[in-house]
């Protein structure tokens, strides 16, 4: 297994593929997270963080059901309440009456 060490900080840099492999090993039935962490020279806390990211879909294989954008259509009563839509460099704000704002 090849990893990169940042000589300025002495920290390893793990690829997402390596992280997924380590997480997968830690999810095998009957395994201990601390044993897997020691095997790969990773702190237990870091492995738990990776497991949480994996569970939340943030460490999934590219195109394998990770976070994605879905089209949204506002119809009916909600469309009538829509007062303005603004977009600025990737940020979207939707103002709805009476005084509700959705920003992403």
Image (cartoon, rainbow, N blue to C red):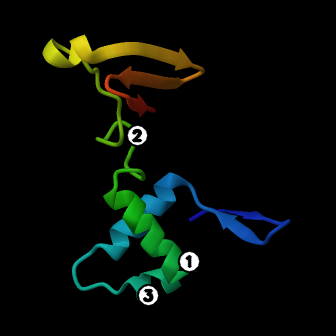
Which residue, as the protein is rendered here, is positioned at the far right?
Answer: 8
Residue reaching furthest to the front: 98
SS class of the residue under badge 3?
Answer: helix
Residue drawn at 43 percent across, 88 percent down: 35
Residue 97 in the image: above or below residue 83: below
Q: Residues within 10 Å of mark 2 (few under 14, many from 20)?
A: few
Which label sits on residue 42?
Answer: 1
Quadrant location, the C terminus: top left
Q: Which mark is residue 34?
A: 3
Separation (CA) of disc 2 from disc 1: 23 Å
Horizontal and vertical percent for residue 14?
59, 60
Do residues under tags 2 and 3 come within 8 Å of each other at their CB atoms?
A: no
Question: Picture quarter containing residue 23?
Answer: bottom left
* Image location of residue 80, percent across then percent down: 23, 11
Q: CA distance from mark 2 to mark 3?
A: 28 Å
Q: Residue at x 55, y 81 (%)?
A: 43
Q: Point out residue 67 in the picture as x, y percentages from the top left corner.
A: 36, 40
Give the answer, above or below, for where 61 lies relative to 44. above
Residue 7 in the image: above or below residue 72: below
Q: Secondary structure at mark 2?
A: loop
Q: Earlier in the sequence, mark 2 or mark 1?
A: 1
Give the residue drawn at x 41%, y 59%.
53
Choose between 53 and 90: the one closer to the eye.
90
Mark 1, Cα crowd under 10 Å, few <14 / some 14-19 / many 20+, is: some
Q: Quadrant of residue 90?
A: top right
Residue at image mark 2: 62
Please tell me which residue is depicted at 39% across the width and 67% down the height of the picture: 51
Q: Disc 1 and disc 3: Cα gap in Å?
A: 9 Å
Residue furthest to the left? 76
Point out residue 38 in the picture as x, y percentages from the top left corner: 51, 86
Helix, strand or loop at label 1? It is loop
């Amino acid at each position: 297994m090849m990893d990169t060490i940042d000589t300025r900080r002495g920290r390893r840099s793990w690829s997402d593929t390596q992280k997924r492999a380590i997480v997968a090993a830690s999810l095998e039935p009957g395994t201990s997270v601390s044993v897997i962490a020691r095997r790969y020279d990773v702190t237990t806390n870091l492995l738990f963080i990776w497991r949480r990211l994996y569970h939340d879909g943030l460490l999934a294989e590219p195109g394998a059901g990770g976070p994605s954008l879905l089209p949204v259509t506002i119809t009916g009563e909600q469309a009538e309440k829509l007062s303005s839509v603004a977009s600025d460099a990737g940020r979207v704000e939707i103002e709805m009456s009476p005084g509700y704002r959705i920003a992403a």
